[in-house]
C-alpha cells in the first residue's frame, strides 16, 4: 500500500510539473505576442501626431517670419516719416528768415545800396538756397501761372491789363515744395482780367 501511494504521489507530481511547464509556455507565448500587438498599436498613431506637430511648428515659424518682416517694414517707414517730419518742421521755421532776406535784398537794390555789399549778400543768399535745394526744397514761382488752389493761396482778385482772368498777377509770398509735397502755398494776387472801361 505504501508503494502505491508513493507511485501515485510521484505521478501527481509529474502531472503537476507538466501542467506548470505548459502553463509557463503558454504565458511566455502570450507575453511574446502582447508586445508585438502593443508596438503595432503604438506605432500606428505616432507618425500622424508627429506630422501634426511638424505642421504646427512650420505654421508658427512662417507666421513669426511674416510678423518680423511687417515689424521691420513698419519701423523703417516710421523712421523715414519721422525724419521727413523733422525736416519739414525745421524748414518751416527757416522759410520766414529766407523771406526777410529776400525783402532786404530787394530793398537794398531799390535804394541804391553799395554794389559790393549787395553782391556779397546775393552770394550768401545763393548759398542758402543751394543748401535748401539739397534737402529737396523747390520754390514755386507763381507769377504768370494759372491759379491752382493746390499750390496757391489767393489773397485777392484785382483787374490786370497784363494778365488774363484767373492768372496769378503778383506774388506776395513765395511757396515751396518739399519733394512732391506742398510745404507752403504761394500767396498770390489773382487777375480778374482787364478792367471794364467806363462808357463815354
Image: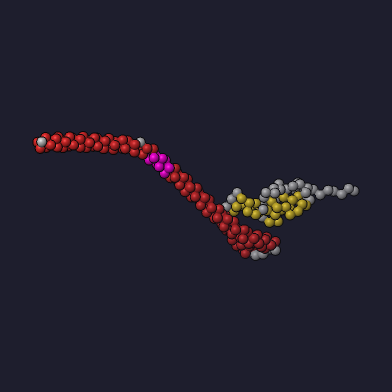
Query: From the image, which quarter does the N terminus lie in?
Result: top left
Residue extending farthest to the front is 1
Q: Magenta includes 100?
A: no
Left or right: residue 65 compared with residue 40: right
Please determine whether, in this image, residue 28 is positioned above or below residue 123.
Answer: above
What residue is shown at x 24% (from left), y 37% (from top)? 27
From the viewer's side, name the closer residue of 37 and 26. 26
Q: Magenta includes 56?
A: yes
Q: Where does the magenta region start and end?
A: 49-57
**x and y, in percent, of residue 176 in the image:** 63, 53
What residue is shown at x 43% (from left), y 45% (from top)? 61
From the viewer's side, name the closer residue of 5 and 126. 5
- Residue 102 visible, this angle: no
Residue extending farthest to the left is 3
**x and y, in percent, of residue 84 in the image:** 56, 54
Chief secondary structure of the magenta span? helix
**Which quadrant of the figure has residue 36?**
top left
What residue is shown at x 74% (from left), y 51% (from top)? 190
**x and y, in percent, of residue 39 in the image:** 31, 37
Look at the image and name its color scheme: secondary structure
Please determine whether, in this image, residue 105 is positioned above or below residue 166.
Answer: below
- Residue 52 visible, this angle: yes
From the viewer's side, name the closer residue of 45 and 178. 45
What residue is shown at x 76% (from left), y 53% (from top)? 156
Please determine whether, in this image, residue 186 is positioned above or below residue 29.
Answer: below
Amino acid at each position: 500500500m505504501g508503494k502505491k501511494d508513493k507511485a501515485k504521489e510521484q505521478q501527481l507530481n509529474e502531472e503537476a510539473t507538466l501542467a506548470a511547464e505548459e502553463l509557463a509556455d503558454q504565458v511566455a507565448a502570450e507575453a511574446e505576442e502582447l508586445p508585438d500587438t502593443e508596438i503595432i498599436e503604438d506605432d500606428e498613431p505616432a507618425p500622424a501626431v508627429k506630422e501634426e506637430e511638424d505642421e504646427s511648428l512650420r505654421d508658427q515659424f512662417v507666421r513669426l517670419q511674416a510678423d518680423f518682416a511687417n515689424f521691420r517694414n513698419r519701423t523703417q517707414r516710421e523712421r523715414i516719416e519721422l525724419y521727413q517730419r523733422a525736416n519739414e518742421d525745421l524748414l518751416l521755421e527757416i522759410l520766414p528768415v529766407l523771406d526777410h532776406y529776400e525783402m532786404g535784398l530787394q530793398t537794398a537794390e531799390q535804394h541804391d545800396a553799395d554794389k559790393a555789399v549787395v553782391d556779397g549778400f546775393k552770394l550768401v543768399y545763393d548759398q542758402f538756397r543751394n543748401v535748401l535745394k539739397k534737402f529737396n526744397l523747390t520754390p514755386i514761382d507763381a507769377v504768370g501761372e494759372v491759379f491752382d488752389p493746390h499750390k496757391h493761396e489767393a489773397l485777392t482778385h484785382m483787374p490786370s491789363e497784363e494778365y488774363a482772368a484767373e492768372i496769378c498777377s503778383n506774388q506776395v509770398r513765395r511757396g515751396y515744395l518739399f519733394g512732391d509735397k506742398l510745404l507752403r502755398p504761394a500767396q498770390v494776387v489773382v487777375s480778374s482780367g482787364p478792367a471794364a472801361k467806363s462808357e463815354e
